[in-house]
Image: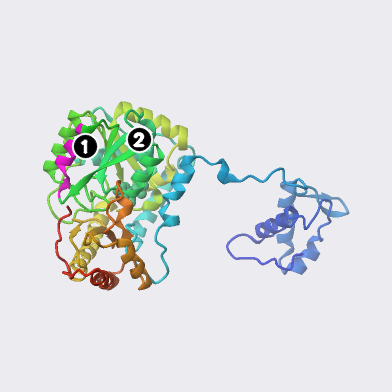
Amino acid sequence: MFNDFRTESDSPAYIQLKVYIETLITQGVMPLHHKLPSTRELAGLLGVSRTTVISAYEALERTGWIEAVKGRGNFVSRAAVHLEEPPSIIDWTERLGPQAFLSEEMDLMKHGIKWEKGMIAFTSIAPDERLFDMAGVKRAFLDRMALEGNVLMNYGYAQGYRPLMEYLLGYMRGKGVETEGKDILITNGFTEGFDLLLTAIGQRSGRILCENPTHHTAVKMMKLHGFKPVGVSMEHDGMNMDELRRTLDEGGFDLAYLTPSYHNPTGIVTSPEKRMELLRLLGEHEVPVVEDGFNEELRYSGAHAAPLIACAGIGNSVAYVGSFSKILFPGIRVGWIVADRKLIGYLESLKRARTIHTSTLDQALLFQYLHNGNFERYLKRARTEYKRKYELAVQGCREHIPMKNLSGEGGLHVFVELEETLDARAVLEDCRLRGVVFTPGDIFFTNGRGKNTMRIGFSRVPEDRITEGLRIIGEVVNKHLEDSGILSDPGKGGGSYE
Ligand SMILES: Cc1ncc(COP(=O)(O)O)c(C=O)c1O
């Protein structure tokens, strides 16, 4: 007893000793009524000050673990309470419902590509944390805490932190959105926003229209909510409109989920003409739209394309879900929904019922960071850095990888379509042996297609490694082409995705 106690420097020694003794008691090493060593004896034994032991004993006494008996010393007064025999052993897998199984089955962190240290990983599309403006973040934190730290640490409001809500409504007006008759709800990123919308929407047809391929998390969530995602193929400028018309004529939809800017995974930006046509068609069929504003800010070139919610003007059919996850800080998990005021009212009640509210501290930090004028400065820098990597990735893909198509007009990833006969997962297996991984494209498809596609995320890969990694992928693809008897033609196609 006590011979394995070691103090670490990052918390007070008396607390470490208290926790150590609590563990001895709960594990039964010190049974009920066991006498503890005197404070002088224990201090000598452990090589700590007597004050440390006295403080630990006092804390243990306050929480009822030990009792001081005058003139006799300290005794264990509360033993760990557990039955001699466990009441029952539950097989939890037998108690779970379909949502638990489906979410586990579709969990890419558990069943996706395994990454090992030193590998060139094109799997992530998270921002590069080396770009984060930490001086701005620290200043924002201190500024806000000095102003109202105590308020921020109390409960906040389900709809959100008022200064951030107003800032973001102004930000949306800057994108051309008519906010009259609309309102805003702060969420834990896009993911919670979409989850709330899927919870709120009643199932009539049980079908949701979306791009094919589309964001894997969105597919997972639609399925978890019992909806069937029905995908419409993508062309280089957005959805295939003929296919969309046919699909809409074939049956009703409860919702359309669309990502018109830097669509994940193809990186395609839907053209202004198609945005208008989409709205007209969906309007005719009375299908409400959830617009994912993903990566709108990371446009490196080309004219500004207004979000669908802006194109809809005073119409109320579009619910826009915004997130700064790919530009600013995904770790603080702050996103928002701008939509019809009535709808937001219901979503607010759902949010309150589920999580009460998004962390006010996180919201306030984001607000102050934006309010201090850091966003534009940071965005300019991030765009420059990511644009360089983007150009390197496009050039590397074209130079080294024989392919049918390359798409991606910006953002943090490009999407490659290999020859029809190739299996991107088999290519991935061989690339992995050579220290390079990417995301196989089939996970993004709603209909089991895309076996010959891959998403290359470049945001967190150092520049020299981007070229090296793409060269290796190219060599492996060439080998697979040779094995299947097809001659390679590096970089064929490019710029479009059919
Ligand atoms: C299409 C799409 N939308 C939104 C997000 C952001 O989600 P969140 O705000 O929950 O981090 C992502 C992240 O990868 C995405 O791919």
Q: Is residue 475 magenta?
A: no
Residue 116: x percent and y percent?
42, 68
Left-right relation of 418 to 367: left
Q: Disc 1 residue type?
A: Thr
Is the CB atom of the residue marked by disc 2 within 8 angstroms of ligand 1's nearest atom? no
Label 1 CA crowd tier, 10 Å (few <14, some 14–19, many 20+): some
* Magenta stretch holds residue 248: yes
Residue at point 66% right, 59% down? 16
The amino acid on which the numbered mark 2 sits, given as a three-letter code, is: Leu
- Residue appearing at x 85%, y 50% in the figure: 69
User: Residue 377, percent across and down?
Assistant: 25, 56
Secondary structure, mark 1, is: helix
Residue 247 bears which disc, if any? 1
Q: Is residue 369 visible?
A: no
> Which quadrant of the structure image shows residue 46?
bottom right
Judging depth in this view, the residue of 162 and 221 nearest the camera is 221
Q: Is residue 343 left or right of residue 39?
A: left
Q: Position of residue 170 (x, y in %)?
A: 25, 39
Judge from the rendering whether residue 296 lies leftward or rightward of residue 33; answer left or right: left
Dominant SS in magenta? helix
The quadrant of the rendering that contains the N terminus is bottom right
Q: CA distance from mark 2 to mark 1?
A: 23 Å
Residue 156 appears anywhere in the view: yes
- The range drawn in magenta is 237-249
**From the Cβ of disc 1, is ligand 1 less than 8 Å away?**
no
User: Which label belongs to residue 197?
Assistant: 2
Of the residues under marks 2 and 1, which one precedes in the sequence? Answer: 2
| Label 2 vs label 1, nearer the camera | 1
Residue 468 found in image quarter: bottom left
Which residue is at 33% across, 38% downward? 228
